[in-house]
Image (tube, rainbow, N blue to C red):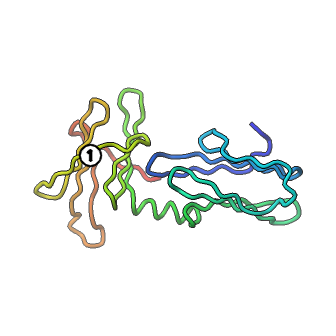
Amino acid sequence: MSSDLVATWEVALSDGVHLIEFEHGTTTGKRVIRVDGKEIHREEWMFKLVGKETFQVGKAKCEIAIEAVSGFAYEYTLQVNGKSLQKFRENQRKITQSWILHIGDNPIRVTMEKDTVDVWVNGDKVNTAAEFVDDGTETHFEIGAHSAYIKICSSGKRRSGLVHQLFVDDVEIPTVSD
């Protein structure tokens, strides 16, 4: 690992949690961006040490801003889809719901996009079948050999809106916060 590594961020998207690493050589101007350990961008010998680098992570447009703070000190900020990472995370909490479960020794991440009701299992969009039930809807899908469904029903409170629950083999899985 390079000694020029200056920032790392974790970004939770529908297709999983991605690790973004940024290297900045303040003497050479080198800039390297890695996503999930894979190098996606490299610049060598840049004379301008400040600026922005734009790149994609899945469907998300990301931008790293490099700003001089004082002398040879720099600040690095990440924007995702035009929002600061903090605002992006707040927005993701509103539009997605995620669960993590273990089948055997394997952690499984299930994410549902609330607006489209698309379901992702470990980063792969899965086929679903929706049905209406007495108190809401159920969106059925498979996780390997296991049957799963997400139940959506009213919380009964106007401010809370809808409740989303994941069941795998008829056992409820607790939600996670990213």
Image side of residue 131 versus residue 158, left or right: left
Residue under the image location 14 percent in, 55 percent down: 132
Image side of residue 11 versus residue 164, left or right: right
- Mark 1, residue position: 128
Percent coordinates x, y for residue 42 in the rendering:
74, 46
Q: Does residue 70 sit above or below 100 in this rendering?
A: below
Q: Does residue 54 sit above or below 83 in this rendering?
A: above
Q: Residue furthest left?
A: 134
Percent coordinates x, y for residue 159 in the rendering:
30, 72
Residue under the image location 77 percent in, 50 percent down: 31
Percent coordinates x, y for residue 117 in the rendering:
31, 55
Residue under the image location 33 percent in, 47 percent down: 174
Three-letter amino acid code at the position of disc 1 = Thr
Percent coordinates x, y for residue 27 in the rendering:
89, 51
Where disc 1 sits, the SS reads loop
Q: Residue furthest top?
A: 104
Which image quarter holds the N terminus? top right
Image side of residue 73 versus residue 142, left or right: right
> Dot 1, how many residues are within 10 Å of its Cα: few (below 14), some (14-19), or many (20+)?
some
Image side of residue 105 versus residue 154, left or right: right
Q: Nearer the viewer, residue 135 or 44?
A: 44
Q: Residue furthest bottom?
A: 158
User: How many labels, in total?
Assistant: 1
